[in-house]
């Protein structure tokens, strides 16, 4: 007499089908000491809604002919998510994120906002998922659904590829140290700013403005340098270059 599924939420509410013979006219289905709600019944099956419970319980079916042999049902607690390996990514999705926590081994779906995808189970404490495409740039809630229920509480931010529309001033000494204001779009999640491929210290002002300090040139010599801004979705380079200037000599 099989039972499917054989596990469900500790809060109850799982639809469970028990199959066998001579099950017609079932009067009671017990999960341990608790009665389940019978929703459908034929001679070969009984469908019920599980009551709340914990641990492993025996499931029996009672008909006018007697009580069946027991089957085991496993109660599973709701999952707990502790962290995302990446909290942001491109609006187009496609990147892989690892979710860590507990009670994840029965996960059937992970939702990023309104979009749900099927995860790859690594262990009870870890799963990986390919992030679906987002509807718009911005934060969305992340929900994991398992046999024990659903858990949310983590946030993932969809990011557009940045653009750089300009910067000021456009030149400074080859020794670095020039304060440069960079303007563009989708700059609020900037991860790096480089001048000629050399990382510059920076501060995000808002989604359209980043302030950076030019680093010294690699060889200490003057010349042009690309200004590039990078976030989780990609990189953008200004159409014009920053000019490193030679120091005066007398």
Image: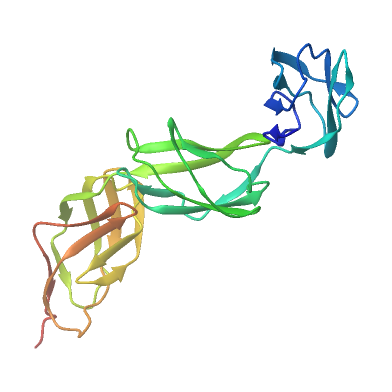
Disc count in the image? 0
- The answer to whether residue 63 is visible is yes
Q: Is residue 111 left or right of residue 135?
A: right
Which quarter of the rendering shows the N terminus? top right
Q: Nearer the viewer, residue 110 or 228?
A: 110
Q: Position of residue 110 (x, y in %)?
A: 51, 40
Q: Nearer the viewer, residue 36 or 63?
A: 63
Is residue 12 depicted above or below 92 in this figure?
A: above
Tell me which corner region of the image, top left, top right, bottom left or bottom right, holds residue 242.
bottom left
Q: Is residue 226 left or right of residue 13?
A: left
Q: Is residue 21 left or right of residue 134?
A: right
Q: Give the residue at x 68% y 36%.
A: 148
Furthest residue to the bottom? Answer: 250
Q: Position of residue 38 (x, y in %)?
A: 74, 15
Is residue 183 depicted above or below 173 in this figure?
A: above
- The answer to whether residue 14 is visible is no
Which quarter of the rendering shows the C terminus? bottom left
Q: How is the image coloured?
A: rainbow
Is residue 221 depicted above or below 158 in this figure?
A: below
Tell me which corner region of the image, top left, top right, bottom left or bottom right, holds residue 6.
top right
Q: Give the residue at x 28% y 58%.
A: 230
Q: Give the residue at x 31% y 43%.
A: 91
Q: Position of residue 95 (x, y in %)?
A: 37, 52
Q: Position of residue 243 (x, y in %)?
A: 11, 69
Q: Is residue 103 left or right of residue 94?
A: right
């Amino acid at each position: 007499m099989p039972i499917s599924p054989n596990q469900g939420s500790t809060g109850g509410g799982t639809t469970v089908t028990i199959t066998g013979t001579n099950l017609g006219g079932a009067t009671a289905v017990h999960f341990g000491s608790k009665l389940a709600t019978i929703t459908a019944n034929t001679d070969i099956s009984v469908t019920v809604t599980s009551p709340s419970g914990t641990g492993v319980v025996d499931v029996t079916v009672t008909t006018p002919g007697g009580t069946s042999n027991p089957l085991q049902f496993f109660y599973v607690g709701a999952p707990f998510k502790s962290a995302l390996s990446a909290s942001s990514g491109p609006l187009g999705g496609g990147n892989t994120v690892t979710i860590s926590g507990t009670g994840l081994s029965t996960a059937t779906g992970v939702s990023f906002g309104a979009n749900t995808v099927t995860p790859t189970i690594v262990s009870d404490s870890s799963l990986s998922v390919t992030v679906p495409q987002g509807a718009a740039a911005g934060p969305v809630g992340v929900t994991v659904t398992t046999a024990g229920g659903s858990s949310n509480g983590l946030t993932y931010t969809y990011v557009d590829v940045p653009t750089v529309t300009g910067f000021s001033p456009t030149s400074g000494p080859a020794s670095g140290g020039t304060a440069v204001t960079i303007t563009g779009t989708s700059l609020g999640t900037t991860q790096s700013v480089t001048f000629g491929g050399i990382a510059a210290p920076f501060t995000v002002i808002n989604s359209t403005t980043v302030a950076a300090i030019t680093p010294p040139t690699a060889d200490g010599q003057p010349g042009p340098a690309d200004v590039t801004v990078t976030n989780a979705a990609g990189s953008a380079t200004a159409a014009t270059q920053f000019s490193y200037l030679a120091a005066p000599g007398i």
